[in-house]
Image (spheres, rainbow, N blue to C red):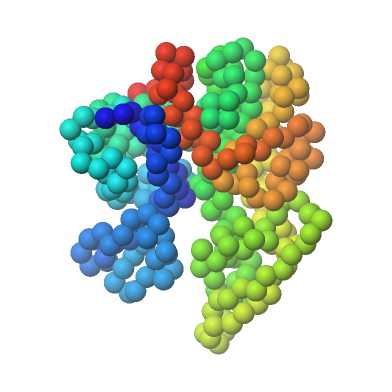
Amino acid sequence: MADIAIDLGTANTLIQVKGEGIVLNEPSVVAIERATGKVRAIGLEAKRMLGRTPEGTLAIRPMRDGVIADVDRAELMLRHFLQSVVPNGIFRSKPRVVVGVPSGITEMERRAVRAAVIAAGAKAVFLISEPMAAAIGVGLPVTTPKASMVVNIGGGTTEIGVIALSGIVADSSIRVAGNVFDDAIVAFVRRSYNLLIGESTAENIKLQIGSAFPTNAEQEMDVNGRDLVSGIPKTVRLHSEEIRECIQEPVQAIIGAVRKALEVTPPELAADIVDDGIVMTGGGALLRGLDVMLGHETNLPIHVDEEPLTSVVRGAGMVLDDWNKYQGVVTQ
């Protein structure tokens, strides 16, 4: 059985099999029956149930803020995903697995990740911090003395790392990322329009008209929800300007974390970052204008990876492809 790389994210789980590329990209959601705890659906099918489940069914995310919040369900989800990409045989020849984890993860959270992956059928589990995996995934020279800086904005955490000689020299990890943008949009629509919307609708609003910095083309969209006063469904029209305003707090928190990492970067390495700039990865990097805003606030060149959603799992996969070169960046 070929070795496997996993990006176990708050929003999505991605799996890459050595020699085959990315074979799975599914939402990290499990739908269960309330009464019995029996699993109804996992992944995309379960995500479709978020906010739409009948009374007896509960759709939950086993991952919270980039780490395992529900070990049993996370193990179930992982086992399901691994079996779907490697039918019949994952347990016969146990693979070596590299998993991307947040850099601010505690020892207890590390143990939870390790336990879930081993229980799902791995032989040996190696952990790699997400900024390091993302840096490798986008092709930065992490093993050289030259500094590289990565800002990985996921669903649950934003991970910032200044990397040189296979190590993270300065880092900052905050539990503010894509999900916090969604929560801010839900709260704003509720407060300003007395309208209750679900997390899927909030995510849609963010993707369609959300932005961190003023854009040339301001947009509007109609949003459906439930009126909190009458209890009747209604539609309101939202403008991109008000959405930009309501997500400024999390945007500023991310910029503050980038500044904090820059402040503790040794001067020699800071000079490399002035030349090469910062690389943005993760789904949050797709928020319109966030790169412009970051460049505006730091006066540094900002590059967004072409496929920011897959950079962590690609990096973890590259570690498996060239184990001798990269084994210094993983921990057991």
Please determine whether, in this image, residue 142 is positioned above or below residue 174: above
Could you say where residue 304 lies in the image, as x and y percent from the top left?
66, 38
Q: Nearer the viewer, residue 330 or 95?
A: 95
Q: Nearer the viewer, residue 132 or 183?
A: 132
Q: Name the image quarter holding the N terminus.
A: top left
Q: Is residue 71 visible?
A: no
Residue at the image point whose x is 51% and y is 39% from the top: 310
Q: Nearer the viewer, residue 7 or 72?
A: 7
Q: Is residue 58 left or right of residue 321?
A: left
Please determine whether, in this image, residue 23 is positioned above or below residue 73: above
Could you say where residue 230 lies in the image, as x and y percent from the top left?
55, 87
What is the quadrant of residue 108 in the picture? top left
Q: Name the image quarter holding the C terminus.
A: top left
What is the quadrant of residue 161 in the picture? top right
Q: Is residue 269 left or right of residue 217?
A: left
What is the quadrant of residue 236 in the picture? bottom right
Please determine whether, in this image, residue 154 is positioned above or below residue 275: below
Residue at the image point whose x is 48% and y is 33% from the top: 314
Q: How many labels were placed on the picture?
A: 0
Residue at the image point whose x is 76% and y is 51% from the top: 213
Q: Is residue 296 left or right of residue 19?
A: right
Q: Is residue 159 visible?
A: yes
Judged from this view, the residue extending furthest toward the left is: 92
Could you say where residue 293 lies in the image, as x and y percent from the top left?
75, 44
Could you say where residue 58 lies in the image, as x and y percent from the top left?
34, 65
Residue at the image point whose x is 72% and y is 28% from the top: 277
Q: Is residue 47 left or right of residue 41?
A: right
